[in-house]
Image (spheres, grey):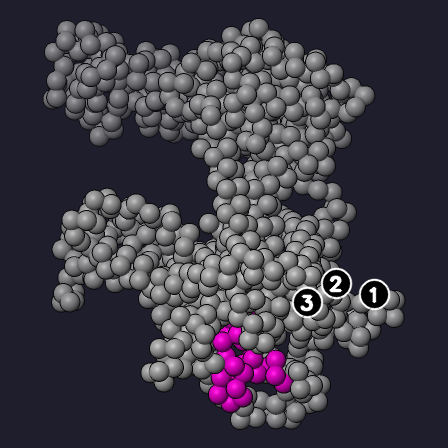
Amino acid sequence: MGAATSRIVKPSVLPGFGPALGYTVFYLSAVVLLPLAAMFVKAAGLGWSSFWETIASPRVVAAYQLTFGASAIAAILNVTFGFVLAWTLVRYSFPGKKLVDAAIDLPFALPTAVSGIALTAVYARNGWVGQFLEPAGFHVAYAPPGIVLALTFIGLPFVVRTLQPALEDLDFEVEEAAASLGATRRQTLVRVIVPAVLPALLTGFALSFARAIGEYGSVVFISGNIPMKTEIVPLLIVTKLENYDYAGATALGASALVISFAILFLINVTQWLAARRHRRT
Amino acid sequence: MSIEVTGISKSFGSFRALDNVTLTVPSGELVALLGPSGSGKTTLLRIIAGLDRADPGSGAILFHDENVAKRDVRTRHVGFVFQHYALFRHMTVFQNVAFGLEVAPRKTRKSVADIRDRVRELLSLVQLEGYADRYPNQLSGGQRQRIALARALAVEPKVLLLDEPFGALDAKVRKELRAWLRRLHDEIHVTSVFVTHDQDEALEVSDQVVVMNEGRIEQVGTPESIFHHPATEFVMRFLGDVNQFHGRVESGRVHLGDVALPGLSVPEGAVDTARIFVRPHDIELDTRRNGQPVVEATVRRVYSAGPVSRVELVMPTGQEMAVTVPHERVEALHLDTGSAVFVKLRRARVFA
Amino acid sequence: MAATVQSRPRKVSIRVDRPAARERRAVRRLLIGVSLAFLATFLFLPLAAIFAEALRGGTKAWIVGLADPAAWSAVKLTLLVASIAVPLNLVFGLAASWAIGKFDFIGRNLLLTLIDLPFAVSPVISGLVYVLLYGAHGWFGPWLQSENIQIIFAVPGIVLATIFVTFPFVAREVIPLMQEQGTEEEEAAITLGASGWQTFRRVTLPNVKWALLYGVILCNARAIGEFGAVSVVSGHIRGRTNTMPLHIEILYNEYNFAAAFAVSSVLALLALVTLAAKAAVERYSLRAPESAPADPILIASNLSEEPAL
């Protein structure tokens, strides 16, 4: 450890700080920071007008609208059902509960391409569920609902796993206090439980949303990929790359990344604010 | 509003938390449920509140002669103060205290202005007027406890129930709050029951003490009667330090060693042996025999750091004995390790 | 920053009977019903469909789908990629958690945030950035071409993209635990004469072994299953740059559903194994006495048994 590092690091008898930090920073830079920087430098090199031309083209705007819309619906579905799921898993006991709890992570463990073709198989016209939906005029596969379906699938664990610890942390006594003060169960839910887990709900929503707008594998099989109709942003990036439109892909990638980072930043601010205000002591 | 508990039992699996408990809390009194952990005191309090249900088929809870068994905690109108306060941490102090008023059914709900006035009034009652906009995490433990109390009182409960109200506080704050709770009760006179495992707290604050052990009530009485006339061995042991000796019953008298102790009647059920209980301050020491039947002992150690001196004795039988006497007495008798002393039991209790 | 699925072992929830903090029986049943119905339509049906489709033509067709040489080379490539990416990220995770978890330095939080970055990046973009760096039109493209080194549309690109998307997994699991455990035990070991390496190996590593294993399981699952990033950099050269997920895509687009689902069923089985392993680690780490602070005396006696390194 040199004199320079000893000024920025608190002294410790433990060895190895220099090499460990050095390797961490090197590996991080080589694997993550340099490639990301390359994209932003490339994007900056495009110039504002050509960047804007790409971003504002109707096909890209349509893809953005679809991606954000479907991701938002999926995140809302996940927050709603994820809350119910997390609640039943934390509070109730029922046969097969452990299995259900473990299965929540399935979308996380299952390769996205496999999820994609599996969802398509179930919800396509001749699929187990699709055969009942299609005659009723409800198109899931190769239509926007299919995209929402896939995005809900891959986002679910984020919401449930964020909510579970927050619900476990809830003190029974607080709910009993509300009841002893005359609150009905519904009043307790709305006024005590939901506000207490609101930071976790928001975080779950944001994580699910952030994952959804970047998702590719599970969507491309079920979406049908029709330009202007069922084409999501990540797919458009791939399409542009396959057509050797590196400038377009770079512009699109940079814009998507900035949005992702903004969401991530918002999550952190939310959590920080929540932690500051309702810190448990 | 009086509380009557008749024949209540509660089991958790095979564990019997309450065993046929019957108790009356007179209107307007402050009653302590005192006992070690696992004695069932908190369970009893929670059943009175309606937070837990007694075993089906066991007795009834009556508030002012009305059976409230069918009413759940929402409609029983009890104020409950939780051991860890259970304040709503996302609400300000004001919102916490106002909660019970705001969730009342529309028909009986007060106007916003009335709620505000009532909260102000309560905050001044618990002496935290300036804290309305703080969050619970910005308060000290003692302040949180007082807010929890104000919140419980906001709905004008007919009875106030407190679960280990000072349990989570440090010793100094505990003592202050104890005296404050007593004064507050003298002011508002709501029938109150509080749970504690601290005998000093129970004896100091309450009008009546209910001593509980293993799901049963051992004794009910004023702090004085409980302390001076413990009904059972458990109460004797629980309410302070006590020496226990193995005595013999011979020709209708209780003997300690070879000495027949005067003024002690043989308890029921005692055949050959009896157990003698004496508090350390109920023992007199002397270096002369003084003519009375006394027990001989040797001083093992004298501890003089403290308000009184503590003397450890060993009797010829090998039994040990702790005695507290004023410092002056130790000096007057020149007590030191190895001194031979004569022991007189001023007041003792004998159990079979 | 919580950009990952944080499902680290939680405290066991004990069932308590508290009527005032509970819903009516009908409500409870309804909620459980809704949960199970939701999981059935979104999770269980698709999972079942994989195996049903894979075995639609009987076990023989299933075996045929797997026995294809292209499938076999996809399996080998997938395993090769995972066996490079996982150890590299494991070493990185340990280095990062040692620096961040055991030392207090300026910029620690920034570093933590940067480590999480790949979680916020779309898989497609993860591939794209490498194309822009090492592709024919990328920063190093011309130089690589002149040196006759191919990264994009070749195995190195697939490995790099996989490393990128699985980058944070091990670090994210181990860093919080090391932070939580503090430095007391390591300091105790040092005062007892242990070298830095001994301290790390005998004190630190055993204390984080479950979190480490947990991170490796997650990292491995993602490395094997990654699709978007790998798809962008692979070039889809059959038998050479196709991983199993890419192979599935090709089969599926060729309407060879039986083979696509046969390969999928293998990956699905692997996912189930991953979930089981994950659950097992969660359970063990709750029970493991190792997660409790180790006894310094035991550490000392262990040290004296083996010669110093």
Q: Which residues are magenta?
A: C225-251
Coordinates of residue B222 in the picture (x, y in percent): 51, 12
Give above or below for B39 relative to C136: above
Residue at (62% x, 69% y) in the render: A235
Coordinates of residue B42 in the picture (x, y in percent): 55, 30
Which chain contains the residue that carries disc 3? A
Q: In the drawing, what numbered circle is on residue A138?
A: 1
Marks 2 and 1, how far apart at CA: 9 Å
Residue at (70% x, 30% y) in the render: A183
Residue C160 placement: quadrant: bottom left
Residue located beneath label 2 in the image? A145
Q: Is residue C81 left or right of residue A104?
A: left
Coordinates of residue C131 in the picture (x, y in percent): 47, 72
Residue B81 placement: quadrant: top right
Marks 3 and 2, how far apart at CA: 13 Å
Residue A17 appears anywhere in the view: yes
Q: In the drawing, what numbered circle is on residue C180?
A: none
Total numbered badges shown on the rendered structure? 3
Q: Is residue B26 left or right of residue C306?
A: right
Q: Amino acid at mark 2?
A: Pro
Please tell me how crowded label 3 is: few (under 14), some (14-19), or many (20+) other residues with Cα within 10 Å.
many
Residue A165 appears anywhere in the view: no
